[in-house]
Amino acid sequence: MSKGVGDGAGTVYACAEIERFCDAYLDGEFTAEDARELERHLDACDECGRLVRFRSGFKAAFRAAAIRPPLPSGLHGRMIEALAREPVPIASHPRWRRTAVRVAPAAAAAALIGMFMWSSHAFSPVADDAISKHQRDLPIDIAGGDEQVRAWFTNKVGFVVRPPRLPPGAIFRGARLANMRERDAAYLVYDVGGQKVSVLVFDPGAVRYESPRHRSVQNHNVYLDGHGGYHVATYRHGDVGYAFTSDMDEERMIQLVSSAVSP
């Protein structure tokens, strides 16, 4: 795109510049003066107007669907300190180039957040898989009692699927064959007091399921993990692994595990 639209004062802004700085404009990176100049271009250029409306709608939909774990304590202050160390924009640059310099610290901040969240949330592969499956409304292949479930999974996975013992009132909704880190697993769904609880049953020798946080429950090491409002409690019982996932609070999850592993 090479055409441009004048602003009435002899300056011509190319559509390529609008495309380049569209996201910065929508994210509030522009000064009021820069925003007015860009908007004058949009008033005169239907093609760029459509582009900006499309990206604005996309950003709104993405924000609405995104999982936002809370920022760790102290991160905001460290971000401010990092931004303060960024080079000051050169005043002699043309306005649009100054905008490009202003965008750079924001991009650095986004990268800083991403790297910090990645390094400080070393979720186990099992926890990531468990939450991903829990969030989806996966179809059910088998319903019934424990014996029917155990029999249905025979020869489908390389271990015996023993459904966990949950407290009275828990309703078994069904199960299906699942995949965990390219390994076969069983996926069981329950209703516990009106809340969905999913349980991945897997071969604990085939995948890494430990996490830094753990508690001893009925002489079992229970590994605790989670993000985005979901909690995962993973443990090994005999030669089988279990990963409980729900949006109920962590203590309630521990109670469920305690019921499942009680003698």
Image: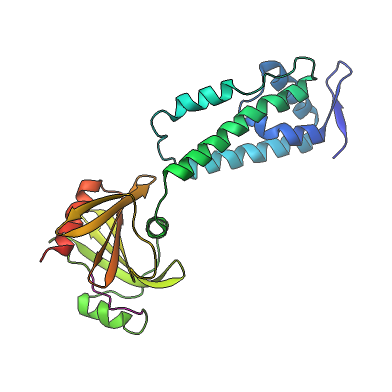
Residue 31, image x, y percentages: 67, 18
Q: Check the picture and name the quadrant holding the C terminus.
A: bottom left
Q: Position of residue 52 (x, y in %)?
A: 69, 35
Q: Residue at x 31, y 56 (%)?
A: 245
Q: Nearer the viewer, residue 13 or 250?
A: 250
Q: Which residues are magenta?
A: 158-163
* 36 within the magenta span: no
- Above or below 258: residue 35: above
Residue 154 in the image: state x and y as whole percent: 31, 83
Quadrant housing residue 57: top right
Q: Position of residue 240 (x, y in %)?
A: 28, 71
Residue at x 26%, y 79% (from the top left corner): 150
Farthest residue toward the left?
Answer: 263
Asked if one can make out residue 145 in the rendered structure from this viewpoint, the answer is no
* Magenta highlight on residue 161: yes
Q: Residue at x 88, y 35 (%)?
A: 3
